[in-house]
């Protein structure tokens, strides 16, 4: 069942099960079976800090596999996450641009990870170097340090395969000037050394355009990832990983909501785009990671990672107008601009072991983490006029002061999972985080937080194929980004999640089903827009939800990946903020209490299924559907939004997007055609959560892809 993994992050070996049922500690390597794809069900994950089957994790876990991303011709992380139930997209105006999602109704920009290390910078991520994407739902701070109530999104990188020399080249062309080329090259150099190189270049246009110039939103991205595995045959294994992603996009900020209808504006065509040939979104992301895995014994190992990251970004975008058409000079609409640099250094070390004590089996995890953040950002200088603006990449404004901070975060953590009677396990964990940050703000130049986070779970395995659990976890967010606009120190942002779940393996483990009922509560929720003067969004809010998911093979020819999420998200207590000038406490309008939380649809549905017609032909298709999503900022003291005397915030309508795929597969090569938005529906997939505008999704597109393996 581990055949699908060439490696999983910096890889480790599958658990061995002895005749008496005891499990041996994961060792160091998982080797791929080159002839069998991983399919739509993942059988290994590190999202719980040790390598294990998602079936055994006492929390809801969703995994997007490499096979599914390839079948769907996914390029960006955002497109891949359409397969995650309970997830919605935020449009990124101003202070929080780049990948920006809500999970279970709570933002995730503090919960993005790459191989278990924080990747919280503001940029648009690609999937060319990803083995899989793991989504751990619920508060995860005991394991990861940052943890909102929604969950953790962990990207798992491709790393070298020690025994298999494999090379794959892929080329794609499609509508809207879509062009993509990728290479995945794996070369064993000797018995203990292997090299893997992944490269990508993608160019893409849009169905939207500026009617005066013909300029379209565009994507131009290229990336390179190099991973060198050393000493792979010994108990001391090393990986040296380098990753670089460069983007040169023309950003799309969508269309305005209409205040008279509280729906996306229809006065001007949805195809209108307010950017021009000079607007831009440029970024350069570099990460270098050294990983060491030391197998102390068959029951114990230490895994340490050291990463240096550097994120540069500069953008100028145009916000839309409800009534005035775009012009050639860029005088219509607002001008969000930014130049920024964000550097991090992370040291993380995990120790895990198994042992018997007092007749009980223990699985112990302990570790430490250090994170240094150094952030600088400022608006760009306008070399033109208001009617004809002219901003240039990385040319910061002369006037004004930059927003900057440096932060040091320290953490230690420990967890024990005890099988106290056969088939019953209890998990207890605690983590201590300390954040010390210095800000450029004159009103709040320093901030210190020290908090504990906890994780507990009770699991019952009546058989190896069945897992019932009840879990509670809470989290503290030692994220300097979240706190910098707090004029006076307010309580730290914290979350609590209670979850009751069940997991089943059917068809000899090929098909996994899961169900979960949960309650997630967040206190002192910070505003996602870092430029807002109101740091607190709500004082307390809650999501109650139900999730169902299926992943895997129904039979030898038919695979499925499906999810349903039902969410009821409410504001329980309105925001308390501190006036920047007077220091007085200000309260949001109390009428927001009891109202729905923003950008949390009452339901989401996702389905992707494929069927192997014969030895060569495969067909597939699916749907992504979401209910209404509200766009509103509930932190203000002003009147609540109404329509005809009834509370009515701006609302993006429900939608269902259908996709289809057909593939002709040979041992050495594959031809595939993907059609996205098969019925060419106009839909809105992202909302600016403060309520200003919404971004339309792609119209019907067709892509042809050729893969060659040698």
Image (tube, rainbow, N blue to C red):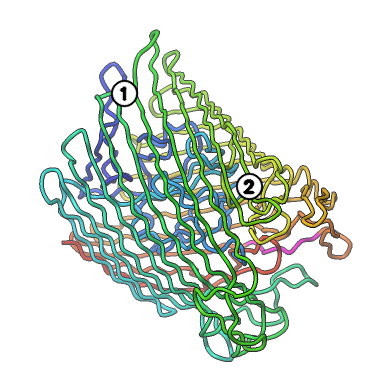
Tag 2: Cα neighbours inside 10 Å, few (<14), some, or many (≥20)? some
Q: Residue at x 49, y 24 (%)?
A: 427
Q: Quadrant of the C terminus?
A: bottom left
Q: CA distance from mark 1 to mark 2?
A: 48 Å
- Residue topped by disc 2: 446
Q: Residue at x 56, y 64 (%)?
A: 377
Q: Quadrant of residue 322?
A: bottom right
**Position in image of residue 496 (x %, y %):** 63, 35
> In the orientation shown, which residue stands out farthest toward the top?
358
**Position in image of residue 175 (x %, y %):** 42, 78
SS under mark 2: strand
Earlier in the chain: of badge 1 and badge 2, it is 1
| Magenta highlight range | 648-654
**Position in image of residue 226 (x %, y %):** 27, 57
- Residue topped by disc 1: 23
> In the orientation shown, which residue stands out farthest toward the right?
645
> Is residue 543 left or right of 349 when viewed as pictured?
right
Q: Residue at x 73, y 55 (%)?
A: 534
> Is residue 591 left or right of 66 when viewed as pictured?
right
In this orientation, which residue lies closer to the viewer: 557 or 38?
38
652 inside magenta stretch: yes
Residue 137 appears in the rendering: yes
Q: Quadrant of the N terminus?
A: top left
**Position in image of residue 639 (x %, y %):** 86, 60
> Is residue 587 left or right of 234 when viewed as pictured?
right
Tag 1: Cα neighbours inside 10 Å, few (<14), some, or many (≥20)? some
């Amino acid at each position: 069942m581990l055949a699908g993994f060439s490696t999983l992050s910096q890889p480790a070996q599958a658990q061995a099960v002895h005749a008496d049922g005891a499990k041996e500690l994961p060792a160091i390597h998982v080797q791929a079976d080159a002839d069998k794809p991983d399919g739509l069900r993942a059988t290994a994950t590190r999202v719980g800090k040790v390598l294990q089957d998602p079936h055994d994790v006492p929390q809801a876990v969703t995994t997007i596999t490499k096979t599914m991303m390839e079948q769907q011709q996914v390029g960006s992380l955002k497109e891949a996450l359409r397969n995650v139930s309970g997830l919605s997209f935020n449009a990124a105006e101003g202070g929080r641009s780049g990948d920006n999602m809500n999970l279970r109704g709570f933002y995730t920009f503090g919960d993005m990870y790459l191989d278990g290390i924080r990747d919280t910078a503001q940029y648009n991520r690609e999937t060319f170097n990803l083995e899989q994407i793991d989504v751990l739902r619920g508060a995860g701070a005991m394991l990861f340090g940052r943890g909102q109530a929604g969950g953790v999104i962990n990207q798992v990188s491709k790393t070298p395969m020690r025994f298999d020399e494999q090379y794959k080249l892929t080329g794609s062309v499609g509508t809207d000037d879509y062009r993509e080329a990728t290479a995945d090259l794996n070369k064993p150099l000797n018995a203990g050394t292997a090299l893997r190189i992944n490269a990508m270049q993608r160019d893409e246009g849009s169905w939207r355009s500026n009617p005066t110039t013909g300029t379209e939103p565009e994507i131009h991205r290229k990336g390179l990832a190099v991973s060198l595995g050393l000493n792979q045959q010994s108990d001391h294994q090393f990986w040296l990983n380098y990753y670089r992603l460069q983007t040169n996009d023309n950003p799309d900020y969508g269309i305005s909501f209409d205040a008279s209808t509280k729906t996306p504006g229809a006065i001007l065509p949805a195809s209108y785009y307010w950017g021009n040939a000079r607007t831009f979104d440029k970024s350069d992301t570099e990460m270098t990671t050294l990983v060491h895995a030391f197998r102390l014994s068959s029951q114990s190992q230490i895994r340490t990672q050291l990463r240096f990251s550097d994120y540069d970004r500069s953008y100028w975008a145009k916000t839309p107008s409800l009534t005035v058409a775009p012009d050639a000079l860029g005088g219509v609409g607002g001008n969000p601009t930014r130049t920024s640099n964000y550097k991090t250094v992370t040291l993380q070390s995990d120790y895990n072991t198994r042992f018997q004590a007092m007749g009980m089996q223990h699985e112990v995890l302990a570790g430490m983490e250090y994170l240094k953040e150094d952030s600088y950002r400022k608006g760009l200088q306008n070399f033109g006029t208001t009617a004809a603006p002219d901003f240039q990449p990385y040319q910061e404004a002369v006037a004004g002061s930059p927003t900057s901070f440096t932060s040091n975060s320290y953490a230690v953590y420990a967890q024990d999972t005890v099988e106290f009677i056969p088939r019953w396990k209890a998990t207890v964990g605690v983590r201590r985080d300390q954040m010390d940050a210095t800000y450029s703000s004159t009103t709040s130049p320093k901030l210190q937080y020290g908090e504990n986070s906890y994780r507990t779970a009770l699991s019952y395995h009546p058989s190896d194929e069945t897992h019932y659990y009840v879990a509670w976890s809470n989290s503290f967010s030692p994220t300097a980004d979240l706190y910098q606009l707090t004029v006076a120190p307010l309580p730290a942002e914290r979350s609590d999640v209670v979850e009751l779940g069940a997991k089943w393996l059917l068809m000899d483990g090929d098909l996994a089903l899961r169900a979960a009922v949960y309650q997630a509560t967040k206190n002192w929720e910070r505003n996602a827009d870092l430029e807002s003067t109101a740091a607190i969004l709500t004082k307390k809010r809650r999501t109650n939800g139900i999730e169902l998911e299926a992943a895997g093979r129904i039979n030898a020819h038919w695979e499925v990946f499906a999810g349903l999420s039902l969410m009821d998200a409410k504001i329980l207590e309105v925001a308390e903020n501190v006036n920047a000038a007077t220091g007085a406490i200000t309260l949001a309008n109390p009428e927001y209490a009891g109202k729905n939380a923003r950008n949390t649809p009452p339901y989401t549905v996702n389905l992707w299924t494929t069927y192997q017609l014969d030895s060569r032909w495969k067909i597939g298709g699916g749907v992504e559907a979401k209910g209404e999503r509200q766009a509103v900022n509930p932190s203000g003291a002003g009147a609540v939004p109404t329509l005809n005397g009834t509370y009515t915030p701006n609302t993006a309508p429900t939608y269902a997007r259908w996709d289809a795929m057909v593939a002709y597969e040979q041992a050495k090569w594959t031809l595939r055609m993907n059609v996205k938005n098969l019925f060419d529906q106009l839909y809105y997939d992202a909302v600016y959560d403060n309520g200003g505008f919404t971004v339309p999704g792609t119209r019907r597109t067709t892509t042809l892809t050729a893969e060659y393996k040698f």
